[in-house]
Image (cartoon, grey):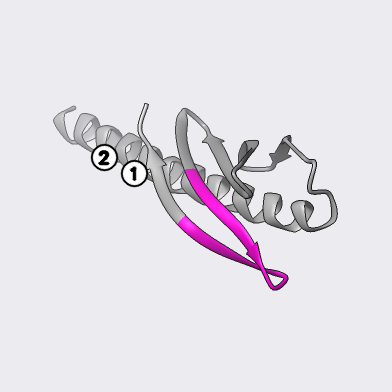
Amino acid sequence: MESYLKSNTENRMVKREVQSRQALYLAEGGVEWAKAHLTTNPDLRKGSLSLDNGQVDVQIELSGGDYKVTSKGLSGLAVRKIEEHLELVNDSWVSKSYQELHQ
């Protein structure tokens, strides 16, 4: 019984870690999605994507000529949120700051 409980606990820990990483990758993908769409639609302010392994919600604010993109990735029970300040310079995105937001 003890072996079963230990292996079951380890299995849940691994699953949570995988979901957490997937949520972070989803959030980073949301920033990339925002970059791609902002080049053609600079008035874009939000978006949402549903994928096989989770969901991404993106909020975009114009801040003094720069864009503040906040992207939240959800995978299973895991939620990861990042914020990136972007500037478009010579048709290329420049990241001015990047941080993970902890809730």
Q: Residues within 10 Å of mark 1 (few under 14, many from 20)?
A: few
Answer yes or no: do the residues labelled 2 and 1 have beta carbons within 8 Å?
yes
Q: Position of residue 57 (x, y in %)?
A: 64, 34
- Residue at the image point whose x is 61% and y is 38% from the top: 54
- Residue at the image point whose x is 30% and y is 38% from the top: 13
Q: Position of residue 63 (x, y in %)?
A: 59, 41
Q: In this figure, which residue is indicated by the disc labeled 2?
A: 10
C-alpha span from label 2 to label 1: 6 Å
Most foreground residue, 47 or 4? 47
Q: Secondary structure at mark 1?
A: helix
- Residue at the image point whose x is 47% and y is 58% from the top: 96
Q: Position of residue 91 (x, y in %)?
A: 72, 70
Most foreground residue, 24 or 103? 103
User: Magenta stretch: residue 41 in it?
Assistant: no
Q: In this figure, which residue is indicated by the disc labeled 1?
A: 14
Q: Secondary structure at mark 2?
A: helix
Q: Residues within 10 Å of mark 2 (few under 14, many from 20)?
A: few
- Residue at the image point whose x is 54% and y is 45% from the top: 27
Q: Which residues are magenta?
A: 83-96
Left/right placement of residue 13 relative to residue 66 reads left
Q: Amino acid at mark 2?
A: Glu
Q: Amino acid at mark 1?
A: Val
Q: Main secondary structure of the magenta part?
A: strand
